[in-house]
């Protein structure tokens, strides 16, 4: 077993580095077109044309979250859609936290100065850059690790809206995503936006919160943009760009639940 493990480490060390990627204007335009469709669907939930909660559309999903599971599913058939020189990832997930009030949940998710505590190891640092009413501008330093490790400095605009006494929703748009070269070292530096490994170029998140059944349901739909999978490096890149969006969403839901349970 030790020999096989050592051999695996040697093969990984000999693997070619991930080919550099560059974000193109047509990639961004395709992502924005996709987002417009997503927001039309979310608008139908908020307006009452569809069920406010995604879990309410499936007894099986209801049972899983009421049983204490955090669930995540691809919004489309496989979770990602190809666009020019990129992939759009669209995942939705939910969790139910019993014994808490809606106000507690909102206080925690708005506490961006402590997100680095709630969402370790993915969130390395966090802080509020500005805040006015229900609008927040926040900084998050993210660590993406799966085969390769990438650190990103990101900024986000977040807005919260109340529907009634038991229901709120929010949306978060990344406004800046810059990969960090040599993080934590004396020669640390940011790469220009849109350059680097390309494991995250955009991240838009849509949350819904509802208090009922003796607790609070939390749902998040996360739409992100990454590089595509280059020919010849699919074995290295594909597990990263295809698995990280789901893994990240589940970690966020589970981290929220853990923080609320303390």
Image (tube, rainbow, N blue to C red):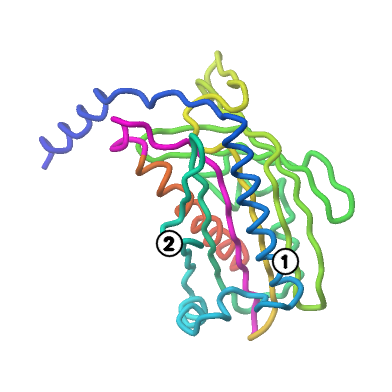
Residue 8 among those drawn in magenta? no
Coordinates of residue 105 in the picture (x, y in percent): 70, 66
Label for residue 77?
2
Q: Label 1: few (<14), some or many (≥20) within 10 Å?
A: some
Q: Regarding mark 2 in the picture, which secondary structure is present there?
A: loop
142, above or below 60, in the image: above
Q: Is residue 217 magenta?
A: yes
How far apart, in angstroms, are the residues tagged by discs 2 and 1? Answer: 22 Å
Q: Which mark is residue 43?
A: 1
Q: Nearer the viewer, residue 11 or 174?
A: 174
Q: Is residue 145 left or right of residue 35?
A: left
In the displayed structure image, the side of residue 250 where residue 42 appears, left or right:
right
> Would residue 232 be found to the left or right of residue 159 on screen?
left
Q: Position of residue 72 (x, y in %)?
A: 48, 64
Magenta residues span 214-237
Q: Quadrant of the C terminus?
A: bottom right
Q: Quadrant of residue 216?
A: bottom right
Height in image: 204 above or below 46? Answer: above
Report the residue at 80% width, 48% height from top.
Answer: 136
Q: Position of residue 40 (x, y in %)?
A: 69, 62
Residue sitting nearer the eye, 168 or 5: 168
Q: Does the residue at mark 2 contact the one at mark 1 (Cβ under 8 Å)? A: no
Q: Earlier in the sequence, mark 2 or mark 1?
A: 1
32 over 85 or under it: above or below: below
Where in the figure is residue 69, as x and y percent of width and height? 46, 72
């Amino acid at each position: 077993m030790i020999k096989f493990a050592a051999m695996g480490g040697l093969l990984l060390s000999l693997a070619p580095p991930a080919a550099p990627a560059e974000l193109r204007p047509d990639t961004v335009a395709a992502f924005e077109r996709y987002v417009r469709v997503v927001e039309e669907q979310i608008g139908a939930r908020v307006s009452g044309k569809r069920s406010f909660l995604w879990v309410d559309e499936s007894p099986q999903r209801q049972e899983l979250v009421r049983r204490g599971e955090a669930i995540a599913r691809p919004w489309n058939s496989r979770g990602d859609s190809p666009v020019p020189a990129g992939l759009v990832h669209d995942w939705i997930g939910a969790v139910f936290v019993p014994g808490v009030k809606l106000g507690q949940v909102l206080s925690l998710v708005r506490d961006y100065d402590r997100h680095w505590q709630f969402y370790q190891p993915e969130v390395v640092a966090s802080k509020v850059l500005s805040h006015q009413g229900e609008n927040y501008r926040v900084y998050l330093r993210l660590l993406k690790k799966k085969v390769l490790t990438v650190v990103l400095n990101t900024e986000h605009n977040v807005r919260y809206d109340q529907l009634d006494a038991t229901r709120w929703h929010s949306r978060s748009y990344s406004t800046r995503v810059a990969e960090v070269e040599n993080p934590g070292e004396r020669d640390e530096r940011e790469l220009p936006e849109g350059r680097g490994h390309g494991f995250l170029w955009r991240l838009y998140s849509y949350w819904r919160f509802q208090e009922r059944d003796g607790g609070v349901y939390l749902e998040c739909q996360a739409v992100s943009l990454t590089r595509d999978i280059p020919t010849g490096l699919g074995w290295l890149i594909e597990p990263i760009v295809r698995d990280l969006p789901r893994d990240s969403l589940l970690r966020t839901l589970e981290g929220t639940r853990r923080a609320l349970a303390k």
